[in-house]
Image: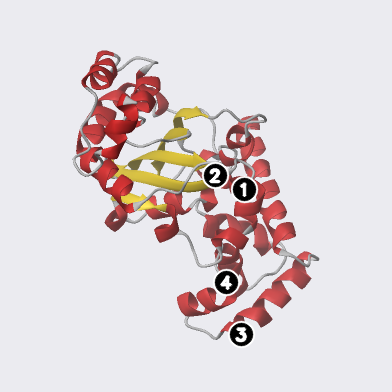
Amino acid sequence: MAAAHRRGSLSTAILDPAALGGLVEHLETERFFDHLHDLLNTVLHINNLVAIVFRNMGSPLILHQKSPQEPNFFRMMYAQGAYLLDPFYLASKDERRAGIHRLKHLAPDRFVESEFYRSYYAKVSMIDEIGLLWPFDEDLTIHLSLGRRLGSERFNAREFAAFSHIAPLLTALLRRQVRGPIQTWLEPVTFDGLAAASAPVIDIAQDWLRGFHATARETEIAALILQGHSNVSIGQALRISGETVKVHRKHLYAKLSISSQTELFLLFIDRIKQFSARARRS
């Protein structure tokens, strides 16, 4: 009852003293994110909490991921390379996007029709997401994801405002929490190919599609399709007509001997796995 009352006072986002005390007490310990989850649930209900450090080149550091779902599609797909298509990962590369965002404000116009959404996002039963993006330094960005699953309501404006209100405090604590793990993570890597295994979508597409004699334009379109853009949205981004996009798309699919976005996505994920396997063998 008390928690429900606290969640009702979202405009002020008053933090529960006991929950805040438990979070501070466990700063720089393995239980920090469990207590962060508890604290956030005194302000707004969440089902999933994920904490990641993105970097400009290279795979991300997974600080925390807690989900009641089995199998764990986050570990099976997202962490293995599908994160490259995550709107929050893509936004982390734009310094102007630092702050709090709703997924719907970052995602392309056909995101829910994209194979990334169908093959990953829908499988984890997520219906809404709020994310914090905060630069740790010039190369690294902290991402805190708050998710709601099927059976819950979508985040509303007051809840978004409540999270935004406490975000500066959370950011300060997160910076302290992640310093040690980041320092360990960034110790010299002994094999080559790590950056290639986690290069931006367009870079992987260029390397992958070169063997199929795809043109530069077809490669650009492939990257945008994978991110969830419609033909119209792609045309706007590349300053060409939607009909021209359709022609390029048809030629690309013919070169790859495929007929759907699903097949394109699966080929892309296979390519990422090849990069990763090659890097581990080096």
Q: Say which label, 3 or 4, has the lower sequence index.
A: 4
Distance CA(mark 3)–CA(mark 4)? 13 Å
Task: Give SS at disc 3.
Answer: helix
Q: Amino acid at mark 4?
A: Ser
Task: Give SS at disc 2.
Answer: strand
Q: Is 213 left or right of 40, judged from the image as shown?
A: right
The C terminus, quarter of image: top right
Residue for point 55% across, 86% down = 241
Say few, some or many: other residues with alpha carbon within 10 Å of mark 2 (under 14 / 14 to 19 / 20 or more). Answer: some
Distance CA(mark 2)–CA(mark 3)? 34 Å
Residue placed under numbered mark 3 in the picture: 244
Residue 126 got which mark? Answer: 2
Residue 122 got which mark? Answer: 1
How many numbered marks appear? Answer: 4
Discs 1, 2 touching: Cβ within 8 Å: yes
Discs 2, 4 touching: Cβ within 8 Å: no
Residue placed under numbered mark 4 in the picture: 230
